[in-house]
Image: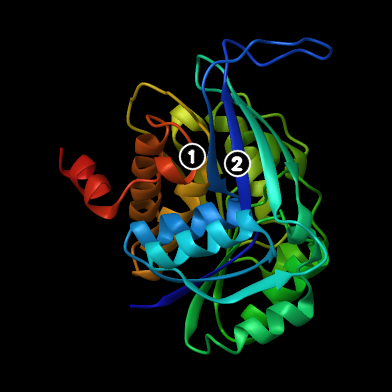
Amino acid sequence: MKKIIVAGSMNMDMVVKTSHIPRPGETVLGGSFFMNPGGKGANQAIAVARLGGDVAFIGKMGDDIFGKQSAQLFEEEGVNTQGIVSDAALPSGIALITVDQKGENSIVVAPGANANLKATDVEKALTYYPDAALLLIQLEIPMDTVAYTAKRAKEKGMKIILNPAPANELPKEVFELMDIITPNESEAEMLSGIRIADLDSAGQAARKIQAKGPKQVIITMGKQGAAVLEDDAFFHVPAPSVETIDTTAAGDVFNGALAVAIAEGKPLREATNFACRAAAIAVTRLGAQSSIPYRNEVLMSIIS
């Protein structure tokens, strides 16, 4: 089985369910509250592990209870943790999440130690995984570290998937290192300058993004599934129809599932279908890592 490295953030998510997401200056009386380990990088690593991938994580945590809990969960889930660095100066990252009655969310992240993941940390961590074949990375760590990690991964012959979230401008050299890029609609609009209203405009945006370097572009479109540009071929992969409870981490589940399928040598259409089905299961459940499905659940959804 090909090893997948996930490099990124690890947070503790603090989630409140409420009727609607507050407007500026508005106080809303919420309902249930719970804490759940999260962070885009950590979510994707757990997704890879649960969906059958051989995964290692590179990231930075605070020397505190939240960091220790996240690292312990990684080990319980079968994620290799040799590449996790403890930061004595900064706390672990946290995310404050509001989820409304329609399952939509609003998130504020305090990155903490995630913002201090450095090239030297990555270089040391990469020595633990000389046989890694695929890198999955996001943008909740410093852009310089993203660029360095991608550069070193490419030098080592790894395939690179970038989930460009949270939305941010990307340097030219980062675009050019990517094999697959997976923006959602708002991220794709930022990267392409094209407003996405339907599949046609998604195709235009995908081609604009592809022209900057990535070989393959997958725009995730929520309930509509994903718009995929593979070389010159553009196609749509629909998502299963489900009742949405909470969209938190749905994109992370999609990316983790995609990485597993790509590492297994699946064609891009089949890999995207697997990812859409995994994400569809996740939105029917509350929380980030608590919503991530296992491989047999996704396979059963494909059969049915």
Q: Tag 1: residue type?
A: Ala
Q: Tag 2: residue type?
A: Asp
The residue under the point 38% across, 35% down is 280
* Quadrant position of the C terminus in the picture: top left
Horizontal relation, residue 47 to residue 153: left or right: left
* Image vertical order of residue 74 relative to residue 148, above or below: above
Percent coordinates x, y for residue 171 in the rendering: 83, 60
The residue under the point 72% across, 67% down is 176
Q: What is the image's colouring? A: rainbow
Percent coordinates x, y for residue 296 in the rendering: 22, 51
* Quadrant position of the N terminus in the picture: bottom left
Closer to the camera: disc 1 or disc 2?
A: 2
The residue under the point 61% across, 36% down is 14
Nearest the camera: 20 or 160?
A: 20
Residue under label 2, please give it: 13
Residue under label 1, please give it: 250
In the rendered image, which quarter is residue 105 located in?
top right
